[in-house]
Image (tube, rainbow, N blue to C red):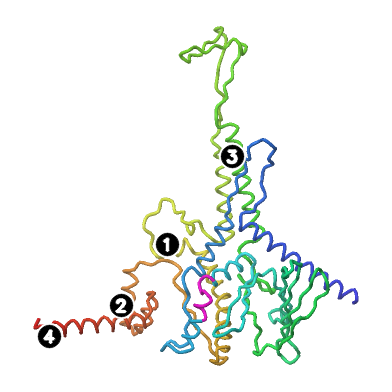
């Protein structure tokens, strides 16, 4: 290996190491493992205050993306057998729970990976941990993957330490080769099996959390600046807690007498020994207003940087009924962020569905339409008035019902069943002479 190749490999290893360290810091922050701002001496109370804003930001982003179920549709005119089969695949893979886990991995790490495992009667979807996946791309096209490497530690049946590795690599003929390997106790990897993947696409589908134009891996919701802001908030709150512990209670001081000259009578009246003696209380002259303002500014900065406004977390001071336009303005940063995620995760879901349907024998060209739920609550009366106007303009009843959150086929079936029951009751009443 010449010096140029060695430098290039060292750069790749350095970037991978930095990426994995970023994952570690982000997960630690999500689970509230922040460094303590103040040193704690033995036998002294711990004044450290740790507030986890990172988890609030991540969970709110996941809730806006997959808090309500997105619907998949192949044909907008009828329910097809392919749609029913696809719906059953997602049901067996616990659709909403699975999607939220995928989005959580993406929000924390910046990239989401899903593996398709063939099975009977339906394929299985596996949410891969991003830190166990390494991607090699075409040198001339950063978006063209030529190799996936999945590697993770494990424990063997006898308690031995193992490293499991699966290499999914495209050969010169465009086929994908799947090689399973294992390393025991830091020994070289031994190949267990090799197989040719029977489809033209790899068994892994992935996407960026937020778009990053010049690298393969995406941008997470939890970057280092967000963690630093959370650390700064914890530092301010911890300092305030320590100040209050020391100075919240007034301290009594006096002059013109010694301690043994101070007398407190039975009725709790304090008697001073001379007319020149004085007794006072030393109290805080500040209510920590400056510290509180700093805390509020840091909190506002964190919400602005993460594009999760405080109103999204339920904080709305001195506001009455808000119109739809006002809500759009208040939620605008989070709405823009979520729409951007719908593009990246939406492409992942479309590709996943296409691959699943091909595995199910429905052909390789099925492109699903994703019907995303509304991001913000709406005025029900105004929404239905607008729906009536749309119907007069020629919009179909199915489209209107879907927009209002109803399943047209289900509502039609219920209506027919209700009409049938009404007809039966009328016939029964007629037979009784009613």
Extreme residue in the top direction:
274
How far apart are labels 4 and 2 at the CA level? 40 Å
Q: Is residue 400 left or right of residue 302?
A: left
Say which residue appears at 71% left-offset and 78% top-offset: 148
Magenta-drawn stretch contains 218: no
For label 2, the crowd category at 10 Å Cα-Cα, with few meaning under 14, some 14 to 19 and many 20 or more, is some
For label 3, the crowd category at 10 Å Cα-Cα, with few meaning under 14, some 14 to 19 and many 20 or more, is some
Q: Indicate whether 200 appears above or below 259.
A: below
Q: Mark 4 against mark 2, which lies toward the viewer?
A: 4
Determine contact: label 4, label 1, CB under 8 Å: no
| Picture coordinates of residue 312, whole percent (x, y) | 48, 59
Q: Which mark is residue 431?
A: 4
Which residue is labeled 2 in the image?
A: 388
Res 246 → quadrant: top right
Q: Which residues are magenta?
A: 89-97
Which residue is labeled 3 in the image?
A: 241
Res 192 → quadrant: bottom right
């Amino acid at each position: 290996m010449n010096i140029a190749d060695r430098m290039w490999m060292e750069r790749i290893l350095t970037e991978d190491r930095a990426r994995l360290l970023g994952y570690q810091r982000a997960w630690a922050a999500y689970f509230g493992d922040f460094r303590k701002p103040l040193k704690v001496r033995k036998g002294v109370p711990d004044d450290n205050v740790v507030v986890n804003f990172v988890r609030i930001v991540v969970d709110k982003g996941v809730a806006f993306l997959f808090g309500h179920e997105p619907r998949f549709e192949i044909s907008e005119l009828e329910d097809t057998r392919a749609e029913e089969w696809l719906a059953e695949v997602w049901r067996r893979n616990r659709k909403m729970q699975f999607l939220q886990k995928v989005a959580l991995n993406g929000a924390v790490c910046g990239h989401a990976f899903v593996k398709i495992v063939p099975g009977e009667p339906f394929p299985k979807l596996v949410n891969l941990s991003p830190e166990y996946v390494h991607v090699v791309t075409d040198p001339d096209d950063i978006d063209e993957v030529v190799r996936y490497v999945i590697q993770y530690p494990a424990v063997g049946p006898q308690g031995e330490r193992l490293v499991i590795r699966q290499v999914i690599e495209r050969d010169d003929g465009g086929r994908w080769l799947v090689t399973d390997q294992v390393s025991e106790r830091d020994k070289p990897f031994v190949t267990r099996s090799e197989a040719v993947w029977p489809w033209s696409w790899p068994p892994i589908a992935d996407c960026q959390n937020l778009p990053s134009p010049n690298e393969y891996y995406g941008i997470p919701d939890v970057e280092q600046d967000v963690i630093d802001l959370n650390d700064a908030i914890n530092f301010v709150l911890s300092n305030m807690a320590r100040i209050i512990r020391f100075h919240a209670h007034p301290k009594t001081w006096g002059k013109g007498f010694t301690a043994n000259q101070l007398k407190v009578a039975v009725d709790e009246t304090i008697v001073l020994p001379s007319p020149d003696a004085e007794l006072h209380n030393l109290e805080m002259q500040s209510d920590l207003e400056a510290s509180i303002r700093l805390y509020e500014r840091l909190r506002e900065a964190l919400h602005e940087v993460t594009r999760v406004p405080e109103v999204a977390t339920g904080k709305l001071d001195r506001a009455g009924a808000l119109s739809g336009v006002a809500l759009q303005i208040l939620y605008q940063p989070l709405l823009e962020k979520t729409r951007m995620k719908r593009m990246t995760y939406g492409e992942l879901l479309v590709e996943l569905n296409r691959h699943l349907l091909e595995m199910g024998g429905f052909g390789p060209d099925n492109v699903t339409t994703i019907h995303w739920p509304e991001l913000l609550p709406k005025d029900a009366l105004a929404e239905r008035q607008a729906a009536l106007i749309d119907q007069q303009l020629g919009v179909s009843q199915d489209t209107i019902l879907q927009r209002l959150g109803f399943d047209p086929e289900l509502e039609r079936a219920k209506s027919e069943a209700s009409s049938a029951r009404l007809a039966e009751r009328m016939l029964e009443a007629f037979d009784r002479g009613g």
